[in-house]
Amino acid sequence: MKKNEKKYSGGFTFVEFVLLASFVGLMTMLVFLVLGFDTESIKKDQCISFQKKVQVNVRSFQDKKNLNPGDKIDWSRIGMDIGQRCPSGGRYVFSDFIPSIGFPACQCEYPCPGSTHHPITTEGW
């Protein structure tokens, strides 16, 4: 073997290791960014689902007690936890009166950037 020949050891060079670590770090950062957006979307869906649950309970109570839109809601008799907060940290505002068809009995006041925690429609609720 000549003096100038180096035997290949089969490991990573320092530059290859730094490039690999940078790539792994970048991919990890992208995964966390994507998951961060998904968690806000999940919280928004949970919030709207709670509003639907409230609406269904109010309509059931209305039917059971033969109440009309505009009649006062007795939240203690409906069995809903009206102290509950939105999963994103917002506050729910509950109506004092049974709403007309198409209007929600509960709304979220969370200021979500780019969208709101209000359902597109309450049709079928």
Image (cartoon, helix red, strand yellow):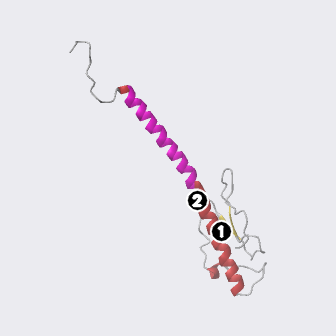
Circle 2 sits on which residue?
A: 43
Taking the magenta stretch, the answer to whether it contains residue 26 is: yes
The image quadrant of residue 60 is bottom right
Q: Any magenta on residue 21? A: yes
User: What is the secondary structure assignment of the residue under circle 1?
Assistant: helix
Give the number of the disc on residue 51: 1
In x, y percent, where is residue 3? 22, 12
Mark 2 residue crowding within 10 angstroms, few (<14) / some (14–19) / many (20+):
some
The residues colored magenta run 15-39
From where the camera sits, is residue 89 visible? no
Image-based side of 70 in relation to 85, left or right = right
CA separation, marks 1 and 2? 12 Å
The disc placed on residue 106 is none
Q: Nearer the viewer, residue 51 or 4?
A: 4
Question: 40 above or below 83?
Answer: above
> Please, what is the three-letter code of the amino acid marked with disc 2?
Lys
Name the quadrant of the C terminus.
bottom right
Direction left: furthest residue: 1
